[in-house]
Each structure stands twice: as structure tokens, then as C-alpha cells.
Amino acid sequence: MVIVITGPTCTGKTKLSIELAKKINGEIINADASQVYSDNDIATAKVTIEEMEGIKHHLLSIKKLDEDYTVFDYQKDARKKIDEIVSRDHIPILVGGTGLYIKAALYNYEFDNEPEIAKERNESTSELYEKLLLVDPKTTIDKNNRQRIIRALNYYEINKKPISSKNNSDKLLYDTIFIGLTTDRDNLYKRINDRVDVMVKNGLLLEAKKMYESGIRTKAIMAPIGYKELFPYFENKYTLDNCINMMKQNSRHYAKRQYTFFNHQLPINWFNVNYQNFDLTINEVLNFINKKTEEVMH
């Protein structure tokens, strides 16, 4: 049995996963694309040693910022960790908001020759989307998702076939329970804004300045929200308030994209989080898992 705990940013995935792991003899596998890298702890809201409470965590801080790490790499690593954890009679718990990582790890998801998004494009997103429609009329990619559009165009150029033709089935390779944490939009946006303020208070500017001065501009630095939004501040192009507001706005937009992916790509069982009494949410999820586990065993 594999447990997945996912949902948009700032919903309480880390806290829930640790409490569940303590109760069901679990070990946690990171499913956040940015957290596989080291030295980016504040911007990625990475779990601290103290927060882990002795629970084993895997695939955290395993790569340097200038190293490449693809979805295919994650697929191999995550499946290996799942097998290792199961061999110890423990329960693997995938935790994070990168839906593609979760899907690649758990489904019969195949990869062709597909580099990560290294080739940037100069065209507007709408122009890129029109190009994509020409080579892949069956595409289901959102017309505003620039990153996935570029990935699809790169894929076509390399493999001479549209990405929608890939033989990726919806067959799960493991008995899996998908748990999604959610809250109403106003509360989610408030939590996102508050988290950004806490990050700044906890030293995000120093962390971002270090990234800026390193000269490294890999996806490990440019993909997560928190660094690229502050670079204009270091270049005296925008005020700090402008950059912080941009971080909050981009985080809210990211949460919306996460919902879109989860609702279309994964069979998630959603739970509205009780932030006033988080124990109620823990117990609700635990009871659900126990019920589902009994159904599988019978």
C-alpha cells in the first residue's frame, strides 16, 4: 500500500504526513520537484530536522543546484524507495505538490528521449500554443501553461511525434490511496501570503541573494517561487515590496494550476483542513485510510 498526500501549496501536507507516519509506521518520500535540491530550504519550505520528529524522509536535498534531475530520474528513484520501504514492512507516503512526479512514480508512465525544459522560446505563450496545435491537434495542455507547451514542442522536435501519442496508461502500479488537502480560496490565499511573509522573516533574502550571486540559472533556481521574483530587487529594478507581492501572486497562480492538474490527472480524495483543530483532520484522514486498507485486504 502506498499513501499519497498532496494538494496545493500551504495546505498542511508536511504536518499531516509526519503525524500519519507516526501512526501507521510510515516513511516519507518527497514529491516536490524543487526539494530534491540542496541549499534552497527557505524558498521551498523544506521540512526541517526538528519537524521530521524522527520520521525517515527520502529524496530530499539529494542534488546540487547545478545538477540536472529529470522526471525520469525521479520515477526510478521513487520506485526504488517504495520497494525498499515496503521490504521493511513500512508504508511509503509520497508527500508533495508536484503532480507529474506523483504520476510518474505510481503509474505506468513511460518516457521517450525527453530532456527537461532546457530550450527556452522567444515567442509569446499564445504563439507557442498555436505552434503546438499544428503538430499536436489532440493536445490537452492548457493554452496558458507555457512550461508544458514548451516541453511538448521540444518533445515533438526530438521524437518526431506529438507528446499526446505517448503510450502512458492510467494503470496504477501499486495499491494507492490519494489524499488531497484543501481549504476555501480566501483562506488558502491568506495562508500563501502569510507564508511568504514568514519566509522573508526567516532569511529568504539572504538565501535568494546567494543564489543571485552564484550566477547559476538552472531550473533548480529559476523554477521555484522565491528567487527569480527577488532578482529584480537585487538589480534595483523593483522595490522589495513589489517583488514580495509578485511572489505572493505567483504562488496563488501556482496553487490554481496545481488544482487543475490534480482534478484532471489523479483520483484524489479531498479533505477540507480544520486549521483550528488539526487533530480532527488527522483523525478523519486516518479513519479514511484504515477503511480503504480494509477494503483492499478483503
Image (cartoon, grey):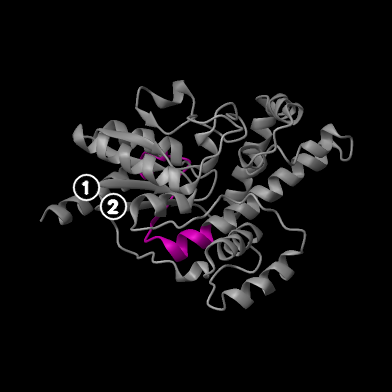
Residue 274 or residue 129, whichever sits in front? 129
Residue name at image x 50 percent, y 45 percent: 70
The magenta stretch spans which residues?
Answer: 259-281
Taking 65 as reference, is 260 above or below it? below
Q: Is residue 268 magenta?
A: yes
Secondary structure at numbered mark 2: strand
Q: Earlier in the sequence, mark 2 or mark 1?
A: 2
Locate residue 91, reporting x and y percent.
25, 39
The C terminus - image quarter: bottom left
Locate residue 190, reporting x and y percent.
63, 46
Within 10 Å of disc 2 (Cα), the crowding (few <14, some 14-19, many 20+) is: some
Secondary structure at numbered mark 1: helix
Locate residue 110, reporting x and y percent.
39, 58
Residue name at image x 43 percent, y 63 percent: 265
Q: Which three-letter amino acid code belongs to the residue tagged 1?
A: Asn
Within 10 Å of disc 1 (Cα), the crowding (few <14, some 14-19, many 20+) is: few
Relative placement, left or right, of 223 versus 286 is: right
Viewer-side label of 2, 1 = 2
Q: Is residue 56 visible?
A: yes
Q: Which three-letter amino acid code belongs to the residue tagged 2?
A: Thr
Q: Which mark is residue 290?
A: 1
- For the residues labelled 2 and 1, the Cα–Cα distance comes to 13 Å
Quarter occupied by residue 82: top left
Number of numbered tags placed on the structure image: 2
Give the residue number, with chain letter if any, for mark 2: 176
Locate residue 202, reporting x and y percent.
65, 25
Q: Is residue 274 magenta?
A: yes
Which residue lies most toward the left here? 298
Residue 182 or residue 171, whichever sits in front? 171
